[in-house]
Amino acid sequence: MQRHDEPILSPRNGRFILFPIHYVQLWTMYKESVANFWTPEDINLSVDRYHWIEMLTSRERRYYSIVFSVLSGSYGIVTDNIASRLSREVHIPEARSFYAFQIAMQNIHGETYSRILHTLIRSEDHRSRLLNSILSIQSIRAKAAWSIRWTTDTRSSFATRLVAFASTNTVFFSSASASLYLLKKRRLMPGVTACNDLVYRDSGLHTHFACVLHDHLRVKATPSEIRLIVYEAVNLEKASNRELLHDSILGLDAMSMNMFVEYFANKLMYMLRQPPLYTNARNPVRPLCYTVSYALIVRIVRFYEYVPSIPLARLR
C-alpha cells in the first residue's frame, strides 16, 4: 500500500483547520496530555540530597547515578524520533497536536532528570566523568544504537517503526521505573519518586497513543514483526540489567528485574492486541509490578484513582 492510501499519512488529509475533530479518540488523548502538564520547578528536591548521602549505600548511589545519567540523556533520542520522523509523517492534526505536546513533555522529563543529577551530584567533574563513563557501557550503547537505527530506518513501514517507538518508550525505561519505585517503597527521596510517578504517567499515555495510532492504520505491523521488535527490545533491556545489577539493589536483583521486564513486555503486547510474548512471565514483586505496569495500561483500564495524582501546589 502506498503512503497516500493510509488516511493518517496522506498529505491529502493534512488539514490546517482543526475543527471539526475527525479522530475523537486521538484528540481526547491530546487533551488529557495537556491536562497533565507539569514543570521541573514543581518537583521539590530539598530532602532528596540528604537521603542520597545518609540513607543510601555507596553501591546504591553508584547504581542510581547511572540510572539518572541515562535518563537525563535518553529522552533526547525519543524526542528526535518524534520530531524527525513520526510527527512529519502523520498528516492529521489530531496526531500532530499530540506529538507536538509530547515533544514538549519529553524535554521536561529530560530537564527534570538533569536537575536531579545536578542536585545529587554537585561536583561538575564527577558528573562529567559519570556521563562519559556510561558511553563505555556496552548494553547502554546497544540500546541507544537500536533506537537510533529505527529512527533513521528508511525501508521499514511506518507501522513497524511505531511499534519500535512504543518498545523504546516502555521496555527500555521499565527497569529504571522499577528501581525508582523501590525508593518510594522505602519512603526515600520523595522528589525523585514524585518525578517518577509523573514521568511514567506521561509515558503510559504516550505509549497508549502509539498503540491507538497503530490501530488506525489500514496496514498494520504483522504479528511476527511485532513479536520480533518487542523481543529484541526485551533482550537488550535484560542485557543492561545483567551488566548493571551485579548485586541486589534494594532487594531486587537482575533475575527479578528481568522477570519484571518480561511481564511489562506482555502488557505492551496486550495494548498492541497481540498474545503474550512470555507465557511464564509473572510479577516478581507484585506491588512494584502492579504500580508500574498500571502506568502503561491506564488509558485502557480507566482506573484513574490508582495513578498518583499530585497537585502542583503540594510539590512546590
Image (spheres, rainbow, N blue to C red):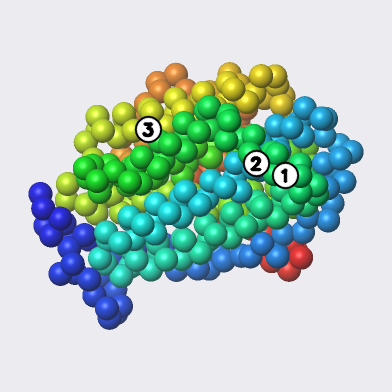
Residue 131: give its label: 2
List x then y, in percent, for residue 21: 29, 73
The answer, for residue 291, to whether it is visible in the render is no
Q: Which of pointers 3 and 1 lies earlier in the amino acid sequence?
A: 1
Which of the two residues, 20 or 145, is positioned nearer the viewer here? Answer: 145
* 63 shown above or below 197: above
The quadrant where residue 226 appears: top left
Q: Residue at x 66, y 52 (%)?
A: 114
Residue 230: give its label: 3
Q: Which of pointers 2 and 3 lies earlier in the amino acid sequence?
A: 2
Residue at mark 1: 127
Q: Residue at x 76, y 65 (%)?
A: 316
Which of the two residues, 119 or 198, is positioned nearer the viewer here? Answer: 119
CB within 8 Å, label 1 to label 2: yes
Q: How far apart are labels 2 and 3 at the CA level?
A: 28 Å
Q: Looking at the picture, which amino acid does disc 3 mark?
A: Val
